[in-house]
Amino acid sequence: MPRKTELLRILLARRGKLRYVDAENGIENFVSILKPTPTEGKRNYESQLKFAVWMNGQLKAHGINEELVLVGVDELCYKIEDSRWRMGRYKWRPSIRNYREAG
């Protein structure tokens, strides 16, 4: 059963909306791919990534076509397809200020 925050995120995303704190600060993914085991860590990381991508898909279905990126701990912006196994926050472009592009 999802926690209250995740449940609220799901309900809002299905209506094409975000919590203010998620829109402003992004959705964290600081899951270590090595803890508690490499297999479980990778599964937990992928779960967070899939959830953020699902939320983005729900927003797009409601006409909100902003790019979702990962702002890494190094303060660089990574495209989702280039962000695998990096820790950081999934953010939408309008909320990003003073970050550099990776690459």
Image (cartoon, rainbow, N blue to C red):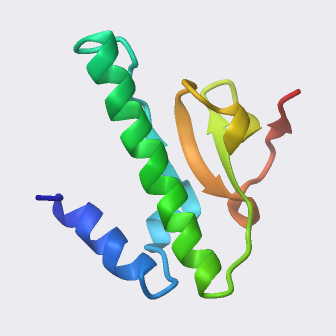
Q: Is residue 27 left or right of residue 68?
A: left
27 lies above or below 64 = above
Image check: 68 left or right of 5? right
Q: Position of residue 96 (x, y in %)?
A: 73, 55
* Residue toward you, 88 or 83: 83
Q: Residue at x 37, y 42 (%)?
A: 47
Q: Residue at x 75, y 60 (%)?
A: 93
Q: Quadrant of the N terminus?
A: bottom left
Question: Percent from the top left, x then y, of residue 5?
Answer: 26, 63
- Residue toward you, 60 or 31: 60
Residue at 43% in and 31% down: 30
Q: How many marks?
A: 0
Q: Residue at x 43, y 73 (%)?
A: 19
Left/right placement of residue 13 relative to residue 93 reads left
Percent from the top left, x then y, of residue 15? 45, 88
Quarter holding the C terminus is top right
Q: Relative to residue 47, is residue 43 depicted above or below?
A: above
